[in-house]
Amino acid sequence: MTKTCLASALMLALFLLSSCSQTTQPPAAGGDSAAKPAESSAAVAPVTAKTAYWEMYKLAYKWTPDILALKLEPKEMPGFSNDGGKAAIWEGTFASPSQHSFRTFTYAIAAHPPDIYKGVTVADSIPWRGVTAEVMPIRMADVSIDSDAAYSAATADAAEWLKKNPSKKLTSFQLGNGNAFPAPVWYFLWGDQKSGYAAFVNATTGKVLRKK
């Protein structure tokens, strides 16, 4: 299988996890009971993936102790800029083998009415058929490289291409795992898969594994 096919297979599998319709519930413990106006970016600042992960994990574990992390990715929030591998909102996909389902947990550093709450919010559970070769659990003990360090490695690797293509923006950025890789990987894509630049960063070592 070519490198491009491996990248496409991983991205398709991770996309399918997020393609189902999900209803976000008001925040449980750790979040405000009602949405408030967006807080000043001077008061709070974007965070790395691992910071957000542990906030989401607390509620995920309360849902079911056999929780498995499948994906982490940043989202956009009005009033904040995601930069340097940090984000104002992070979304995590967690699955439960015993319950045969997965749920999306979202951690936001601030509220932005009407649909973004500060803290952790939890989506409804979606049926899950279990681990596949393309989407495997992420052991956070293997994730030594946080999102900011991974971003630095990826942008350094892509520096020459980005210099030639300054208008191309980062369109995909997520942590996942699959049997095509020796460890969980950070995936970065500038532009699109056809004519953009992609980099996989080993989340254990920080080494760039593949690029396009």
Image (cartoon, grey):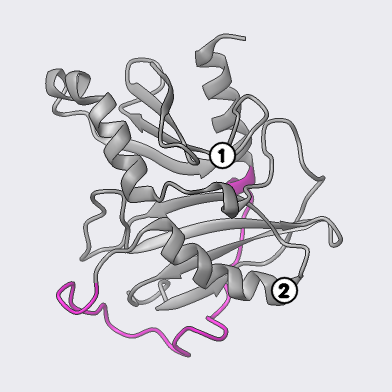
The image quarter in which residue 183 lies: top right
Q: Is residue 161 left or right of residue 24?
A: left
Check residue 184 in the rendering and tell me which mark sits there, or answer none: 1
Q: Which residues are magenta?
A: 17-44
Q: Furthest-bottom residue in view?
A: 33
Sort mark 1 into few (<14), some (14-19) or many (20+) by Cα contacts within 10 Å: many
The x and y percentages for residue 145 are: 42, 46
Kindly identify the amino acid type of the residue bearing the numbered disc 2: Trp
User: Which numbered disc, 2 or 1, marks the residue that appears first in the sequence?
Assistant: 2
The x and y percentages for residue 175 are: 50, 44
At horizontal 25% and vertical 33% (from top left) the residue drawn is: 155
At horizontal 27% and vertical 40% (from top left) the residue drawn is: 152
Q: Nearer the viewer, residue 168 or 59?
A: 59
Q: Nearer the viewer, residue 122 or 206?
A: 206
- Whether residue 156 appears in magenta in the rendering, the answer is no
Q: CA distance from mark 2 to mark 1?
A: 24 Å
Sort mark 2 into few (<14), some (14-19) or many (20+) by Cα contacts within 10 Å: few
The image quarter in which residue 102 lies: bottom right
The image quarter in which residue 16 lies: top right
Check residue 63 in the rendering and tell me which mark sits there, or answer none: 2
The x and y percentages for residue 23 are: 60, 66
Compared to residue 53, the image places residue 193 above or below, namely above
Q: Is residue 118 left or right of residue 82?
A: right
At horizontal 56% and vertical 65% (from top left) the residue drawn is: 105
The x and y percentages for residue 138 are: 62, 47
Kindly identify the amino acid type of the residue bearing the numbered disc 1: Pro
- Whether residue 36 appears in magenta in the rendering, the answer is yes
Prevailing secondary structure of the magenta residues = loop
Q: Is residue 42 left or right of residue 51?
A: left
